[in-house]
Image (tube, grey):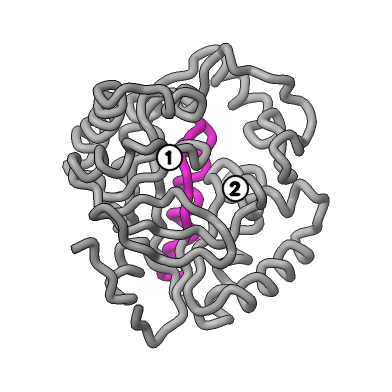
C-alpha cells in the first residue's frame, strides 16, 4: 500500500427509517462543509423480523459491547413507525437514496430483503437463496440510482462460506465484513477485504454509539476518538449508523469532521481510499 496522506473512511450502515430519513440528509449536508466523501451501505429491505423483537427499553450489553437501545436510538416516533409498517427502505425512500449518488458519495449493498433474517439465517441458506437475496438488493439499487453496487457488507457482520464467490458472480469487488483495530486490507477470492478499525468491540457495535452508551460526554468521546486515531495510524476506518451519528447524537458529526481535518486526515470513500493506497481487486 502506498499513500502520502492520512486517510479516514466512514462506514455508515443504513438499516432503519431514522437512518435514511434523518441521518443521511444531515450527514450529506455536514460532509459538504468539510469536503468529505462518505461510504454508505444500504439495507434495501426491511429493518427487522417481528419474531426477533426483544425488550427494547435499556442500553444493552447482551452481545458484550455497550450499545444504545433501539428505543433510544430510534426514538419513539421512528420505533413506532417501524413496528407498525416496517417498510423496505429502498422502495420507501427513493429520493434519499438517489441523493447519496447525486452528492458524489458512495453506496454499497448491506444484505438482502430483511436485515434480521440475514443475520440469523444466512449460514443456513442454500446457494440459490443467497443469490436471490443479493440479486434483489442489487436490482433495487440499480433501479433507483442507475449504478451497480461494487461494495458489500453483511448485516451484523454475519457472512457465510458461500458469500465471497456469490458476490464475485454479481461483480462486487469489495467485502467489508471484518473489524478490529489492527485489521489490514487483504485480497482473497477476487475480492478486496476492506477493514473497519474503530468499532465497539468485541461485537462490532457502532463506534460512537458504544462510547455514548458508556455515558461519556461529547468532550470525552472526542478525546477518545483522537486517542484512537493517533494509535491506529494514517489509514483508519470507523463504523456507525446514520440514525445515531446523524440523528440521536448529530452534535458529534461536525466535531468529528473538524477533528479529522485538524489532524490532517482526508475523508474519502472506500473506492477513493483504494485508489490512493494503490490497491485493486485484480
Q: Left or right: where does residue 248 sit relative to residue 152?
A: right
Instruction: Say which residue appears at 74% left-offset and 20% top-offset.
Output: 55
Figure quadrant of residue 199: bottom right
Q: Is residue 124 above or below residue 226?
A: above
| Relative depth, front residue between 82 and 129 | 129
Instruction: Say which residue appears at 28% left-offset and 32% top-offset.
Output: 134
**Could you say whether the residue bearing mark 2 is in a helix, strand or loop?**
loop
Circle 2 is placed at which residue position? 204
Instruction: Say which residue appears at 54% left-offset and 45% top-offset.
Output: 241
Bin the neighbour count of mark 1 within 10 Å (Cα to Cα): few under 14, some 14-19, many 20 and up.
many
Bin the neighbour count of mark 2 within 10 Å (Cα to Cα): few under 14, some 14-19, many 20 and up.
many
**The N terminus lies in quadrant:** bottom left
What is the spatial separation of the Cα atoms under label 1 and label 2, in whole angstroms? 12 Å
Q: Position of residue 165 (x, y in %)?
A: 25, 42
Residue 96 on the magenta span:
no
Circles 1 and 2: CB distance less than 8 Å?
Answer: no
Q: Position of residue 90 (x, y in %)?
A: 34, 30
Span of residues in magenta: 10-36
Q: Is residue 135 above or below residue 238?
A: above
Q: Position of residue 224 (x, y in %)?
A: 72, 67
Circle 1 is placed at which residue position? 154
**Could you say whether the residue bearing mark 1 is in a helix, strand or loop?**
loop
| Label annotation for residue 1 | none
Q: Position of residue 109 (x, y in %)?
A: 34, 41
Q: Left or right: where does residue 192 sit relative to residue 240?
A: left
| Relative depth, front residue between 253 and 266 | 266
Instruction: Say which residue appears at 46% left-offset and 80% top-offset.
Output: 6
**The C terminus lies in quadrant:** bottom left
Amino acid at each position: 500500500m502506498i499513500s502520502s496522506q492520512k486517510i479516514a473512511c466512514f462506514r455508515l450502515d443504513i438499516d432503519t427509517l431514522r437512518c435514511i430519513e434523518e441521518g443521511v440528509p444531515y450527514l450529506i449536508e455536514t460532509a459538504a462543509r468539510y469536503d468529505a466523501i462518505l461510504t454508505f451501505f444500504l439495507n434495501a429491505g426491511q429493518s427487522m423480523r417481528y419474531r426477533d423483537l426483544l425488550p427494547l427499553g435499556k442500553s444493552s450489553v447482551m452481545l458484550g459491547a455497550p450499545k444504545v437501545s433501539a428505543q433510544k436510538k430510534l426514538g419513539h416516533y421512528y420505533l413506532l413507525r417501524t413496528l407498525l409498517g416496517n417498510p423496505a427502505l429502498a422502495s420507501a425512500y427513493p429520493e434519499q437514496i438517489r441523493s447519496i449518488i447525486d452528492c458524489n458519495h458512495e453506496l454499497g449493498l448491506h444484505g438482502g430483503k430483511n436485515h434480521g433474517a440475514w443475520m440469523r439465517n444466512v449460514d443456513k441458506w442454500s446457494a440459490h437463496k443467497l443469490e436471490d437475496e443479493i440479486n434483489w438488493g442489487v436490482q433495487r439499487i440499480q433501479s433507483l440510482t442507475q449504478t451497480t453496487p461494487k461494495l458489500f457488507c453483511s448485516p451484523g457482520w454475519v457472512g457465510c462460506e458461500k458469500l465471497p464467490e456469490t458476490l464475485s458472480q454479481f461483480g462486487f469487488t469489495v467485502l467489508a465484513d471484518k473489524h478490529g483495530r489492527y485489521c489490514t486490507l487483504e485480497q482473497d477470492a477476487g475480492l478486496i477485504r476492506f477493514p473497519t478499525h474503530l468499532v465497539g468491540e468485541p461485537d462490532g457495535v457502532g463506534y460512537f454509539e458504544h462510547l455514548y452508551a458508556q455515558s461519556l460526554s461529547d468532550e470525552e468521546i472526542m478525546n477518545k476518538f483522537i486517542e484512537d486515531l493517533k494509535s491506529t495510524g494514517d489509514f483508519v476506518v470507523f463504523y456507525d449508523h446514520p440514525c445515531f451519528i446523524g440523528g440521536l447524537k448529530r452534535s458529534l458529526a461536525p466535531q468529528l469532521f473538524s477533528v479529522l481535518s485538524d489532524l490532517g486526515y482526508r475523508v474519502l470513500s472506500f473506492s477513493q481510499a483504494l485508489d490512493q493506497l494503490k490497491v485493486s481487486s485484480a
